[in-house]
């Protein structure tokens, strides 16, 4: 059974809302809101499969769209699961801070926070939805470019995560700032390559009808990374835990795009 755009979109909102309701219920009981990150990443795989199964588009294009989103989604889901639910699960400092700020009405505020993450799942997955509805029987050069960009971004994310994990695994690095590999050129190389993923989805959908309208996806992701839950919260937590060491890292290292170190000259 094939479904049109608006009905697929409504179905996606229902699925995401129900998933986040379940995750919220679990989070309240295990007292670890960090599992919302795992669910957020995993929901994209679920939605992509729904779009491909019910969409009326060209099958090779649907396979390409699902492969791109699923490869990113499952890698991130597994990475976050290991970080959040490892041998000694500890709630991320960002969520511990929210617990303090929202103490007076914690369950309700977390409920709406989780539902908001589900809405983001749907809003950000629209490029894949549109691609799965595109019946044009030919893969466009931009779609191949999207695949290449996606692979580059995945390799970059994998490298950044691996370098950080190796750094943290060494007890001698406690209290220090990781400046290994990509982290020497960007304070957040993982976020940069994460954003590049969303650029790849925009490239993927450009040849599809109304695909240009999804420019909001990489722009919205950029906004969240720079203004909301990405860089600001991560760096606030880093300053709380590392102090002046991290402030010096901020002075000398690009915040986002990997770039050469800044030379700081004393006055």
Image (cartoon, grey):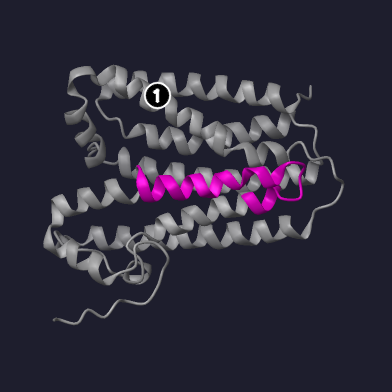
User: Which of the two residues, 232 or 234, is positioned nearer the viewer here?
Assistant: 232
Q: Residue visible at 27% across and 24% down?
A: 30
User: Which of the two residues, 65 or 10, is positioned nearer the viewer here?
Assistant: 10
Residue 217 belongs to the span the image colors magenta: yes
Residue 84, position as x, y percentages in the image: 31, 40
Q: Residue 8: in sight, yes or no?
A: yes
Residue 102 belongs to the span the image colors magenta: no
Q: Quarter of the image holding residue 95?
A: top left
User: Callout 1: helix, strand or loop?
Assistant: helix
Which quadrant is home to the C terminus? bottom left
Residue sticking out furthest to the front:
267
Stretch of the chain drawn in magenta: 202-228
Q: Magenta residues: mostly which secondary structure?
A: helix
Residue 18, position as x, y percentages in the image: 49, 18
108, above or below 203, in the image: above
Residue corresponding to mark 1? 23
Residue 10, position as x, y percentages in the image: 63, 21
Tally of numbered tags: 1
Q: Residue visible at 60% across and 47% down?
A: 215
């Amino acid at each position: 059974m094939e479904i049109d755009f608006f009905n697929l979109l409504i179905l996606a909102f229902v699925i995401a809302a129900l998933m986040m309701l379940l995750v919220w219920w679990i989070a309240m009981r295990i007292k670890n809101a960090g599992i919302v990150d795992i669910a957020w990443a995993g929901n994209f795989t679920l939605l992509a499969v729904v779009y491909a199964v019910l969409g009326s588009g060209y099958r090779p294009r649907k396979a390409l769209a699902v492969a791109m989103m699923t490869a990113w989604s499952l890698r991130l889901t597994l990475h976050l699961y290991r970080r959040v639910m490892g041998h000694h699960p500890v709630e991320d400092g960002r969520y511990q801070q929210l617990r303090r700020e929202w103490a007076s009405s914690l369950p309700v505020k977390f409920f709406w926070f989780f539902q908001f993450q589900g809405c983001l799942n749907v809003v950000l997955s629209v490029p894949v939805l549109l691609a799965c509805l595109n019946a044009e029987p030919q893969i466009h050069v931009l779609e191949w470019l999207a695949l290449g960009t996606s692979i580059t971004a995945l390799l970059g994310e994998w490298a950044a995560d691996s370098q950080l994990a190796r750094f943290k695994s060494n007890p001698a690095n406690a209290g220090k700032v990781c400046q290994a590999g990509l982290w020497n050129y960007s304070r957040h190389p993982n976020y940069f390559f994460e954003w590049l993923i969303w650029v790849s989805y925009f490239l993927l959908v450009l040849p599809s009808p109304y695909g240009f309208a999804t420019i909001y996806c990489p722009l919205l992701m950029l906004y969240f990374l720079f203004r909301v839950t990405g860089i600001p919260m991560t760096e606030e937590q880093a300053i709380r835990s590392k102090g002046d060491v991290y402030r010096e890292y901020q002075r000398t290292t690009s915040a986002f795009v990997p770039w050469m170190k800044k030379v700081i000259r004393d006055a």
